[in-house]
Amino acid sequence: MFNALSKQPVDKIMQLMHMFREDPRENKIDLGVGVYKNAEGVTPVMRAVKAAERQLWEEQETKAYVGLAGDPVFADAMVDLVLGDAVRRQQVAVVATPGGTGAVRQAFEMILMASPQARVWVSDPTWPNHVSILKYLGIEIVTYRYFDAETRAVDFAGMMEDLDGLRAGDVVLLHGCCHNPTGANLTLPEWQQVIDRMNAVGATPMIDIAYQGFGDGLDADAAATRLVASSCPETLIAASCSKNFGVYRERTGLLMAVSQNEAGKALAQENLTSLNRLNYSFPPDHGARVVTMILTDDKLRADWAAELEETRLGMLRLRESLAGELQRLSGSDRFGFLAQHRGMFSLLGTTPELVERLRAEHGIYMIGDSRMNIAGLNDETVPILAKAIIDVGI
Ligand code: LMR
């Protein structure tokens, strides 16, 4: 039977991770997978996470199942973190999921259950796994322009022109903040125009928010998601705790479905809970419990928020120093966009051939579309990367 299986398409982020590991060069630089690294190249366990885990180890008396939708206290704490008071809690159905990817997958499955003919619009480019999962589920994909190759900012005019093609029942997938892979983000007035367009035709927004706290701050990064949730009749929100709590391997995320009223919420909740049961039964608890402990304890929460803020400011400093170094070497402002982008990534906007030369000649690894993980840099490697970018002729 297994002989009948076909080869699977390669995930370019996973492939690059593998190539980096296999590269024997000592001075290689990893700007690939979206995992935060400090100046020493380490992905640290955050202080508040360590403290909560220590406390959990002491206090936890059972590993019995929690609930199909996860712990309601986790749901409350995360709805509060992402949505603040933008909507009433009674409007929001929530399931805990294995990471943000689990939430994205459950959202697409819910779309399929509710409306098998729905088309899902994704930005060009988007996180490649969005497209892979949609294709796997057989959901029709439509792309909208997003990135201006000249300015390396959002091509908002192009985006709106493409969204002219929206139809009632379509779903529009948007990145809540820190767009992956480009680093370029909509302004709030632009978000409002997208909202108006979706509402005018009866399209449903789906927000993927995986980097809250990595861009302009915890609340600023959630502002667009809150605006959408409070302005549209229904919203799907896939949120990840992997990055902002640094709990990547614990697989901690959640899917929220915001409805207009409690009856809508109840039906969404029933379906989401059933999807959890069908796909993996109970969601993982460890990461969610640690996150809950942090968010519900004033001291732990303050310490977590402070460490997250240090992380965010560190990435901003790296952006500015890379843009500055490139300005010095190139004698032009053409890399100024690096300081304007937000989050872990920037799309350099160059060809796969030059990205390959960076890898082959300089041991610098970025995704083939020229996405680089800013957090993979430090004060020593910023000048090395800048020089390599100029050397290969970007
Ligand atoms: C990324 O975009 O690199 C991260 O979200 C990790 C992943 O799973 O792809």
Image: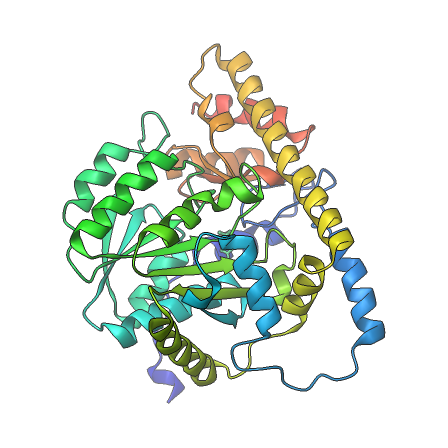
As drawn, is 60 to the left or to the right of 194?
Answer: right
Tell me if residue 344 can be seen. Answer: no
Question: 180 or 207: which is nearer to us?
Answer: 207
Quarter holding the N terminus is bottom left
Q: Quadrant of residue 88?
A: bottom left
Q: How many marks?
A: 0
Question: 127 or 97: which is nearer to us?
Answer: 97
Q: Position of residue 127 (x, y in %)?
A: 41, 52
Residue in the picture at 46% in, 43% down: 223
Q: Is residue 93 above or below residue 178?
A: below
Q: Quadrant of residue 297?
A: bottom right
Quarter holding the C terminus is top left
Residue in the picture at 24% in, 40% down: 159
Residue furthest to the bottom in view is 1
Q: Quadrant of residue 70?
A: bottom right
As drawn, is 344 to the left or to the right of 171?
Answer: right
As drawn, is 225 to the left or to the right of 309?
Answer: left
Q: Is residue 188 above or below residue 93?
A: above
Residue in the picture at 53% in, 71% down: 96
Q: Position of residue 124 (x, y in %)?
A: 30, 45
Question: 101 or 29: which is nearer to us?
Answer: 101
